[in-house]
Image (cartoon, rainbow, N blue to C red):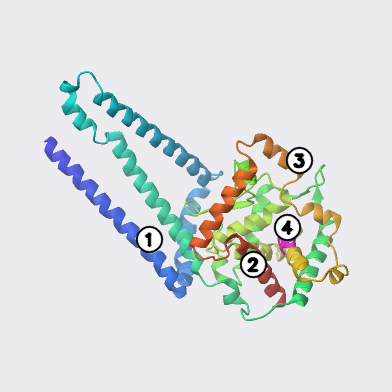
Amino acid sequence: MEHWNWNEKKGIHQKQNLCMLLLAVLFTGILLLSWQSRAFTDWYRLHIFPIWTGTLGRVSNVWSGSVGEILIIAGICYGLLGAVLLIVSIIRIFWHFWSKKVQHRMHAVTKKQRLPRMIRIYLRCLSWILLLVYGTETLNCFVLYHATTVQEQYFDSKAAYGTKELIDAYTQVVTQANALSGQMQRDKDGQAVYPGTEEELYEQCRKAMQAQGTVYPYLAGYYPRPKPIRFSGFMSQQHLLGIYFPFTMEANYNTVMYPVNVPVTICHEFSHLKGVILEDEANFFGFAACIESQDPYLQYSGYLSVLGYLARQVRQSVPEDVRAQMVQATEQVQKDDIFLTQAQWEKVEKKAALPTEIVDKATDAFLEKNLTMNGVADGIQSYSRVVQLVLAYYGQ
């Protein structure tokens, strides 16, 4: 009977191994196809990808907190459990080997040298977890890097934009930001805050993105509730305003950052939920959705989100004497155009477990590697390509 049970378990494990292999081959095949065919990737983004947002997104939306954040913590705990099991197994093997009753335990030692049952179960579960992560990252992230860009699909990709167009766009953004800054409701510290409730802000962001869907079809449809990150202090050390979790289909945002960053960050992460994976394009859609909204707070957030990129390009491309004649951002706009205030940074640093410099460098290295591996040759620098999209937007 025991022999039959062993054969039965062996058969089940073989079927599981075959299933995992077939799934891994399927995910890899889809990824390779996306590298070779933009037509396939565009079709996938428009017709297949919404299924994941509509299913995984709705399931994770049942929980008000970030499910992705919880899964990451669980993953870290699972890794620590593996380390403990490994250490215990090694100790047990050495204990049996060096026992005084070696002669009586030789048979037991031979059996114990095989991986203990707990380790085998752990490794099999780990294999499924890694396959799940690989699958969701592939289907909900890696494939999408190879879709046709918004500039190629909706703007004139051959159009050349020079200094005049840059000055015009910068002037538009600064003028609007200056005007809106005086309309903002502010707290006792002078921070621009949303006049309504959190849920009302979320609803405005959803409406803004759904309105974009009338122009860009892949942006239409269902949007789940954006999720605040509990460990936003650590997120701030990484200089991250928001994050998209492809394995839970959630749009997450930093709760520590300066409040006016929240709307454009939510819209940015929402665009990832619709298959816009390139960061410069997500920056652009966050900007466009917010400034075309009827809500002044969203508009202000949108203009501020690209002001820094445009100002940097102006400093690099426009002669100093010409810059002196251009419209300038008011002192209030400059105060609002920040990631964190000094007081917020002090709170983050006070609670930090690791130095911010180390965390920031590690994050940059990871992002750079992830982007270049997925075909984004200029890595993190690609974020600033939003300037080209803003010029195309105003030019058109």
Mark-to-mark CA distance, 3 and 4: 21 Å
| Whole-percent x, y for residue 167 in the image | 79, 72
Magenta residues? 298-309
Q: Nearer the viewer, mark 1 or mark 4?
A: 1
Q: Nearer the viewer, mark 2 or mark 4?
A: 2
Q: Is 188 situated left or right of 377 in this image? A: right
Asked if the residue at tag 3 contacts the one at tag 1, i.e. Cβ–Cβ closer than 8 Å, the answer is no
Pointer 3: what residue? 343
Residue 385 marker: 2
Pointer 4: what residue? 301
Farthest top residue in view: 100
Please tell me in which quadrant of the rendered image residue 162 appears: bottom right
- Looking at the picture, which amino acid does disc 2 mark? Arg
Mark 1, residues whose alpha carbon is within 10 Å: few (<14), some, or many (≥20)? many
- Looking at the picture, which amino acid does disc 4 mark? Ser
**Which element carries disc 3, helix, strand or loop?**
helix
Q: Earlier in the sequence, mark 1 or mark 2?
A: 1
Does the magenta portion include 88? no
**Which element carries disc 4, helix, strand or loop?**
helix
Asked if the residue at tag 2 contacts the one at tag 1, i.e. Cβ–Cβ closer than 8 Å, the answer is no
| Whole-percent x, y for residue 212 in the image | 62, 67
Q: Earlier in the sequence, mark 2 or mark 3?
A: 3
Mark 4, residues whose alpha carbon is within 10 Å: few (<14), some, or many (≥20)? many
**Which element carries disc 1, helix, strand or loop?**
helix
Mark-to-mark CA distance, 1 and 3: 46 Å
- Looking at the picture, which amino acid does disc 3 mark? Ala
